[in-house]
Image (tube, helix red, strand yellow):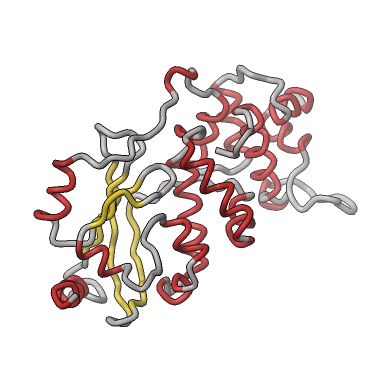
C-alpha cells in the first residue's frame, strides 16, 4: 500500500507506529527518568510480548519472516490492538503468496447496478479498494451534490473544501475513512489505484499524511452519520457496508434512516430533493 515498500517493511512501519501510540502508563509499565520517546521502546514491547529484544528488533527491521501465531498474538496484546488491527497485523506478518494478490475489478456488475438503481430506495455507493466511486444511484448523487466531484471518497474528504461543512464531525470522518481504507485495501496493496491515491494525498494533504502515519486499520461496517447538506441542512443517517463477493475489493455502502432515530424523515426529504433535481 505504501508505494515501493515491501510487505516486511510495511510490518515494521506498522509496529513502530503503533508502539509510538502506547505510553508506558497505558501498558502498565513504570516510568523512570527522562524519556526521548512518547511511546514504548522496542525492549518494552519485547518484554510485554515475552520475546527477546533482538527478535522483536528483527521483526521491525523485516529480518524475521516467519513469526508464529503465538508471537503475533502476544505482540498484538502488548500493543493493545483490537480485533481488526490484529487481523491487519497478521496479514502483514504472514502475507499471502504473490499469486493470490490481485487487482480489484473496476467495472460494476450489471445486476448490482440494477439493484442500486431500481430496487434500493436509499443512497447507495459502490467503491473499489482505493475508495474510488465506481457507481452511485440517484439518491447518493443528491446526498453528495455539494462536492465538486464525486470520484473518490478519500479525495472528497481531504481535497474538497465542501467536506468541512458536509461532515458535522470532520475529524472523526477523516480518521474513520483512512482507517477503513487501510484495512480494506490491505489485500490490494499493489493495486495501481491504491498506490496512486496514497501518493497523491500524501503530497497534497498534510491532514491525510498526519492520519496515515498512525497506521490505524479498522473497517467501518456500520456507523451513524451526521451530515450537513447544502440544501437540506443537517441530515442524520446510518450506513452499512457490504462486501461484493464476486468482485473482491468492491464494497457497497447503503445509507438508511432509523424510523425511531433523530431524523426519521431524512430519506423522504432527500427523495423529494432528488425528484426535483
Residue 87 visible somewhere in the drawing: no
Q: Quadrant of the N terminus?
A: top right
Residue 153: image x %, image y %?
41, 57
Residue 252 visible somewhere in the drawing: yes
Check the image and name the residue furthest to the right: 33
Q: In the image, 119: left or right of 205?
A: left
Residue 62: image x %, image y %?
69, 25
Image quadrant in which you'd find residue 264 = bottom left
What residue is drawn where x is 12% and y is 48%?
Answer: 114
What residue is drawn where x is 55% and y is 42%?
Answer: 81
What residue is drawn where x is 67% and y is 51%?
Answer: 21
Residue 147: image x %, image y %?
39, 69
Residue 98: image x %, image y %?
49, 19
Viewer-side residue, 134 vs 52: 134
Viewer-side residue, 11 vs 135: 135
Please tell me how many numbered marks the rendered image carries. Answer: 0
Image quadrant in which you'd find residue 267 = bottom left
What residue is drawn where x is 21% and y is 74%?
Answer: 266
- 121 w.r.t. 39: above or below: below
Check the image and name the residue furthest to the left: 118
- 222 w.r.t. 83: above or below: below
Q: Quadrant of the C terminus?
A: bottom left
Q: In the image, 161: left or right of 270?
A: right
Q: In the image, 240: left or right of 117?
A: right
Image quadrant in which you'd find residue 276 = bottom left
Q: In the image, 160: left or right of 270?
A: right
Amino acid at each position: 500500500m505504501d508505494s515501493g515498500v515491501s510487505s516486511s517493511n510495511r510490518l515494521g512501519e506498522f509496529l513502530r507506529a503503533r508502539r509510538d501510540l502506547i505510553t508506558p502508563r497505558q501498558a502498565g509499565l513504570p516510568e523512570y527518568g527522562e524519556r526521548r520517546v512518547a511511546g514504548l521502546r522496542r525492549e518494552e514491547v519485547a518484554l510485554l510480548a515475552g520475546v527477546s529484544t533482538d527478535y522483536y528488533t528483527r521483526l521491525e527491521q523485516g529480518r524475521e519472516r516467519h513469526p508464529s501465531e503465538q508471537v503475533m498474538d502476544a505482540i498484538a496484546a502488548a500493543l493493545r490492538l483490537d480485533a481488526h488491527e490484529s487481523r491487519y497485523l497478521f496479514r502483514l506478518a504472514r502475507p499471502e503468496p504473490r499469486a493470490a494478490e490481485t487487482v480489484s475489478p473496476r467495472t460494476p456488475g450489471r445486476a448490482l447496478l440494477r439493484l442500486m438503481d431500481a430496487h434500493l430506495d436509499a443512497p447507495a455507493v459502490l467503491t473499489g479498494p482505493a475508495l474510488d466511486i465506481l457507481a452511485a444511484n440517484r439518491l447518493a448523487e443528491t446526498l453528495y451534490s455539494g462536492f465538486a466531484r464525486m470520484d473518490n471518497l478519500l479525495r472528497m474528504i481531504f481535497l474538497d473544501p465542501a467536506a468541512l461543512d458536509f461532515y458535522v464531525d470532520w475529524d472523526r470522518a477523516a480518521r474513520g475513512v483512512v482507517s477503513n481504507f487501510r484495512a480494506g485495501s490491505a489485500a490490494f496493496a499493489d493495486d495501481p489505484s491504491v498506490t496512486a491515491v496514497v501518493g497523491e494525498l500524501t503530497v497534497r494533504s498534510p491532514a491525510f499524511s498526519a492520519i496515515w502515519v498512525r497506521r490505524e486499520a479498522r473497517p467501518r461496517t456500520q456507523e451513524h452519520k451526521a451530515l450537513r447538506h447544502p440544501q437540506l441542512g443537517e441530515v442524520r443517517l446510518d450506513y452499512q457496508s457490504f462486501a461484493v463477493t464476486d468482485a473482491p475489493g468492491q464494497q457497497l455502502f447503503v445509507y438508511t434512516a432509523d424510523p425511531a432515530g433523530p431524523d426519521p424523515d431524512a430519506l423522504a426529504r432527500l427523495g423529494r430533493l432528488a425528484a426535483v433535481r
